[in-house]
Image: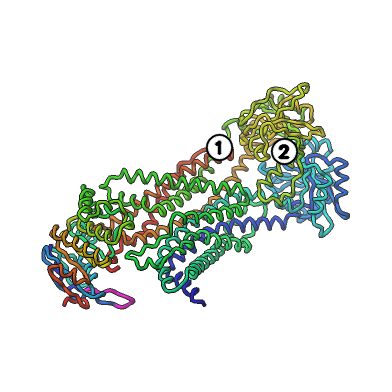
Amino acid sequence: MSVRVEGVSKAYNQSDKSVTVLKGLSFEVKQGESVAILGESGSGKSTLLALLAGLDSPDSGQIWVEDQSLVNQSETQLAKYRAEKLGIVFQQFHLMQDLTALENISLPLELSGKRDAKAQAEKMLESVGLTGRARHFPRELSGGECQRVAIARSLVSRPKLLLADEPTGNLDAKTAERVSELLFNLVAEFKSTFILVTHSEVLARRCHRTVRIVDGMIV
Amino acid sequence: MSPLWRLCFRELRNHWRFSVFFILNLASGLVGLILISSLLESVQASLDDRSQAMLGADLSVSIRRTLTAAELKALKQALPAGSRSIEIADFFSMLESGGDSRLVQVRAVSDGYPFYGTLTTRESGVVGASGVSGLEKTQSAWLDQELARDFLLTPGKRFELGGVAFTAQDAVTEDATAGVLTLAAAPRVLVAKRWFTPKYLDSRGTTLTYSWLIRLPAGMDADPVKKAVEKLIDDPSVRVRTHKDASEGLARLLKYFSDYLALVSLASLSLAALGVVYQFRRFFLSRSKSLAILLSLGATHGRALQLLAMELGVLSLAGSAIAIAGAALALPFFAKALGPLSVVPIAPTLNWGVGLAAVASGTILSFLLCLPQLWSLRKLKPVELFREQTRFTEGNSSSTLLYLPALVGFAALSIFYANSFWLAAYFIGGLTVSAFFFTLIPWAALGVLEKSVSAACFETRLALLHLRRNPASTLLICVCLGLVTLLATLLPQIRSSVRAEIETPEKGDRPSFFLLDIQPDQLDPLREFLTKNGAKFLRPSALIRGRLVSENGKQTQRQEKLGSFVTREDEQESAFRNRGFNLSYRDGLSSSETLVSGRPFSGAWEAISQKIPEVSVEERFAGRLGWKLGDVLTFDIEGEQVKGQIVNIRSVRWSSFQPNFFVVFQPGVLESFSGVFIGIVDKLEAEKAREITRAMAKEFPNISFIKVDQVLGRIYAVSEQMISALLLTTLWVLLAAALTLYSIARYESYYRMSDMNLLKVVGAGQQTVRRIFVTESLTVSLLSATIGSVCGIGIAYVLMRWGLEGTFAWEPASIFVAIGGVTGWMYVQTLLTARRVWLTKPRELLVA
């Protein structure tokens, strides 16, 4: 799935002041390509991910995912886009605390009404090496395990586009290495387009290409 | 202001939503207690102000017979010099005029009546002390104004009072001495005692009470005189009362009604307490990280605890202040609603003593309720801040034990406000059982639903999973909703049952008339008269006055002053034991009686057998006095000691209006004693009943009869008033529950925002999130409301069948209204509190 961002700007109101986060940003990601977006804190990386995920809309500009524009889509259409085509991995894992590891993974499949959701989730759990943790709740898992569950959940519906926001940012070096290995292997296996936001140069080097954002603009 | 105070106020301001809901929650629980206590204090103060006027004296000595010469001498001896006394007699009789008759309460007074208080009459205006002397001069009477109006008894008109002719002299419009409302709806007639012969008065055996009203020298305390009289006249059936005792007696009447109000207030307090616990727990968990940071910056655990305690103190005091203000605003409305049920005016002013007690109760209770969180602060470790995932929890299962002091505190509060150990025990027990029902059944039902819902029903399954995996909030909501529905169902069910009981005259064996004061020689003529007039005279029963002398050989002592008892149960037991007994005899049980334990009578007693005569006692009466099978009771009847051994305990359906007694002897024991008879007249058509009453008043002027329908009408009116007032007070429970539920729902929405955003990120639409919330809300409310309704019906059934000994008649409409109301309310609340969850865009997850 290809992604094209054309002249996207976004500003937020903070304490009665308008802060422009993205300033006419443009770039393109090809089908199956992995791109790392680097930048300092506050440079607009996460805002860009939110726009790509259809969680927010730009003030101006266009975002094309394949031939479909994400701008001016209804909430229902955006929800459908996320359910069918998108996977997201967060820095804070963001697992549902009420649900077990297996239930967290099967969530996107159930939302799409897949009948074999449980079987697919179990398979995915196995592929991230957590078969024995299926019935554990997030509070009973370590940080690395939580992130592996989050990765499994993001990929279980075989999304054509995977977005990751500092996926190893909350992990120690050794765990981060294992998690990133897993993430890149699975992305390769599923042939997903991968956009990774990170501070880590090491992680960025594993991607096909690197894009750097400074003050809301690509440099 | 110290830095800690500054921090305290800053934290409360920053968490202003929590602060507001905590304060409102606490206030909603306390306001009911302040209201009820203020009303009762007001009634007591009003009674104290009027106590001398209501008794008409400083002290009264009452007995169901005339005092013996020795007792009169002892009375004179006990009274201080300068005391004055007059003798009066109270009894029920039939007033007959213009072919119609009515039961009236006759007060036969002597010159000097009343010592205190005033009467207002149509002709003479306000009449003070000794104002009724005119009645001594001519054979005339002052009648209650409604009675005078109904019988057209204008001054100079003649009428008969139990066969004695009188002339109406005046109509009384206000009578400070008439304190108690009688269920028989018998209006009062004032006459001079001298117009009745002693023989005539003695013939009023069942309802006659002689009283000696005493006026003490100015400024003298009545209590020591009362003790002196009681010491010299040892007979416990002689009742000596000061004017304060009289007002306490009246206050006690209202106390039965206030029991329910106290329970309702405690129910609202318990719901508010649940809300307070939940909110503070959430508040503490959300603040754990900041408290840990405070500790890492050098604050001691003691300082952190001090900060939390200060915050809790500020919130408790604010909650109490709001409760006092709310009670002050609501008091006039409550005073107006409850006014018709009180025998004295209720001043709609807030009692500050009560307010302060509520402040103390609210503050102490808040600290006890939040003790587990305060305690767990000790275990808060700033080292958690260095971990990869900061996890602050309340502690382990031992923290559950820390809720025990709150439970004990709540029990103590219940006893204090209910003024009855047993009432409080029933409340705490009922609450525990209800909580058990309202948690266990929904929990099991949710488990079954969770397993049975197909994986395809995504929203329903997720909703059920959330409910099952968050037991604290789910069960708290279940308890709140269950209790609310229980109360909303209970009162309408009782009302419909009482209505059905009263409005179905043809039901059962209920008679038309209850006849009193039938002389033994009138039995046959009366039966003949009634048969001739097409009526049946049923169940004639002898009524013989007796006094309990000893129980199992142990002398019955006069109990202490009524006002000095710690709980009402002690007070009632004393009152039962002290008073005289109406004894009777019969060979078996009547249709309104059921044998509970023991055996039936063995037949008629024969003196030659030298066995102790057999006695049957009523179940509750026996329970109150601690009597059991085999106990030997000794009664003094006309100076002779008569023993009886309890061979059976029976229950009595008092609402049947049959002649029933607490203590019944086997035949062959009491027949030789003089007494009167009571009986009933079987159900009659209204016109026939009127004819018979007219004829009977002429033929048997000394016999009084109570029209059962009239009594039921009075009960109906009073019960309707009471239930309406109770429904009004139940609104407080609904308010407390609404606040508790709203604050829980608000917190839950807030804490689930992240999860729901995540759901949206993985593809759920707004509608999906909305459906999850609505499914949760409807499932919990339907389950809890159904269980609450079933419990309400169950309790109403038990109360009607065994408490009021009536018939249960259920009202389906109120059940559907309660369930529908609760479910609708929860639906609206969900829309209000969770709307922002499904409307919020989930981008916060990425910028977190």
Q: Position of residue B186 (x, y in %)?
A: 69, 43
Q: Does any portion of residue B524 appear in the rendered image?
A: no
The kind of residue tagged 2 is Gly
Q: Chain of mark 2?
A: B
In this view of the protein, which residue sits in the foreground, A41 or B508? A41
* Element marked by disc 1: helix
| Left or right: residue B428 compared with residue B445 | right
Residue bounds of the magenta highlight: A9-17
**Residue at mark 1 to residue at mark 2: CA–CA distance:** 42 Å
In this view of the protein, which residue sits in the foreground, B420 or A189? A189
Residue at 80 percent of width and 57 percent of height: B221
| Left or right: residue A178 compared with residue B480 | left
Q: Position of residue A122 (x, y in %)?
A: 23, 50
From the image, give the main secondary structure of the stretch colored magenta: strand
Q: Residue furthest front?
A: A174
* Element marked by disc 2: loop
Q: Are marks 1 and 2 in contact (CB under 8 Å)?
A: no
Q: Residues within 10 Å of mark 2 (few under 14, many from 20)?
A: few
Q: Is residue A12 within the magenta segment?
A: yes
Quadrant position of residue B830: bottom left
Earlier residue among tags 1 and 2: 2
Q: Which mark is residue B772?
A: none
Write down the residue under mark 1: B801
Quadrant position of residue B719: top right
Q: Which mark is residue B98?
A: 2
Q: Chain of mark 1?
A: B
